[in-house]
Image: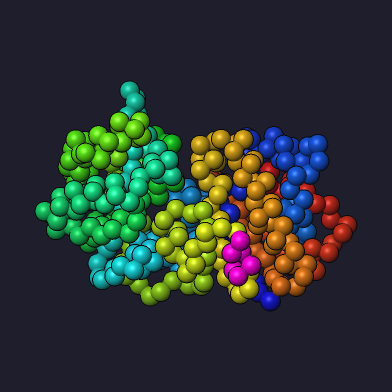
Amino acid sequence: MSQITLVVPHLLPLPEFAPDLVRALTTPAPQTPMLATLLARTVAHRRLATVDTARALPHEQWLARALGLAPDGQPAFAAAAMRGFGLDPEHGTWFIVNPAHVQIARSHSMMADLRQLDLDEDESRALFETARALCQEIDRPLRYGDAQTWFLRADDWAHIDSATPDTVAGMDLTDFVPRGARALAYRKLQNEVQMAWHTHPVNAAREARRLPGVNAFWLWGAAQDKAPMNGKMASIGTPGWIAALAERRLDSFDQLESVLAQDGLLVVGHLAEAAIAADWGVWLQHVLNLEDKLFAPLHAALMQGRVTRLHLVASSRDGLAEFTTTAMAQRKFWCRPTLERLI
């Protein structure tokens, strides 16, 4: 028997779309009955007041607190993510660095969702080596995690105020320019890397294939090496930095049963890309898939006593809700299954 905490970012639709999306999932007949049952038959639930999402999304803030990675109230993921990639954070302050594509319009600039960059390992390695040489010139070590996740050490940049890439994706970058006493030095490095990448063979090849160029990097998540984070965690469908925090990275939901066999935390990231892009048709399709692959097996595990307690954390860009249920709560037949708590 186990107790499971399930985090599903963007399971809460944005308020202006929520009624129509819930209607689409329930008309002409309920299409997600197990999710509806898990949400309706609970021992506790709460919708948290909107938090300050200027630098991190609600689920990112929740994860940082749950894992003990918010020492000053702000998410500090870099050192823990480095360990997940087998890298030694040593001493000092490390940042997560994500290669990115920035679109420049007449009145503003905007960073694309990193999931849409489609950057492969060989391309990333080549761009990384170019950036690493420039970082070395100013005594800023750069380390490689995966194609989308690098790490930069900059001890004197510790107080740069930056946001997570999912917070920034699709938004006007003017509102998210890193600030702080050393932000000017960061922007100077950013400009030098941008110029080096502008004529890079990787970007020339990507342009020929009509793929977005890698013309910027995003720096965030400053952290110093601390004790190992709290709790056991698994992940599926998440960005590289979240996967690096997990002890287990699932390739498919076929591995779900092994996760349910012991207490732990599971982060499921399948809804993020569609929600960030406001592609609600694709979001609906993913929710239906999660009903079959995730919510139905979880409900069955509760009813069979293999899971004694399920704590579900659902979020949107600007809100978060928590639902706690048990096998006994799931037998409250008088509570009608409903998705109304998503609204």
Q: Residue 341's spot in the image, x, y percent?
A: 71, 49
Q: Is residue 46 left or right of residue 64?
A: right
> Of 120 and 73, which appears nearest the observer?
120
Residue 153, located in which quarter of the rendered image? bottom left
Residue farthest left in this picture: 137
Q: Is residue 225 above or below residue 111?
A: below
Tell me if I can see residue 323 in this picture: yes
Residue farthest top in this picture: 106
User: Is 114 one of the magenta-colored residues?
Assistant: no
Q: Residue 56's spot in the image, x, y percent?
A: 44, 51
Please name the residue shown 52% across and 46% down the image.
Answer: 272
Q: Is residue 81 left or right of residue 271?
A: left
Q: Is residue 286 above or below residue 43?
A: above
User: Is 257 one of the magenta-colored residues?
Assistant: yes
Residue 240, located in which quarter of the rendered image? bottom left
Tell me if I can see residue 184 in this picture: no
Q: Which residues are magenta?
A: 254-259
Q: Residue 143's spot in the image, x, y percent?
A: 26, 60
Q: Residue 77's spot in the image, x, y percent?
A: 39, 61
> Of 75 and 312, which appears nearest the observer?
312
Q: Is residue 184 above or below residue 2?
A: above
Q: Is residue 334 left or right of residue 97?
A: right
Q: Main secondary structure of the magenta part?
A: helix
Q: How many marks?
A: 0
Q: State the quadrant of the N terminus.
A: bottom right
Q: Is residue 207 left or right of residue 282?
A: left
Q: State the quadrant of the C terminus.
A: top right
Please name the residue shown 52% across and 65% down the image.
Answer: 234
Please name the residue shown 51% across and 72% down the image.
Answer: 231
> Of 210 and 176, which appears nearest the observer?
210
Residue farthest right in this picture: 334
Please name the residue shown 78% across and 67% down the image.
Answer: 303
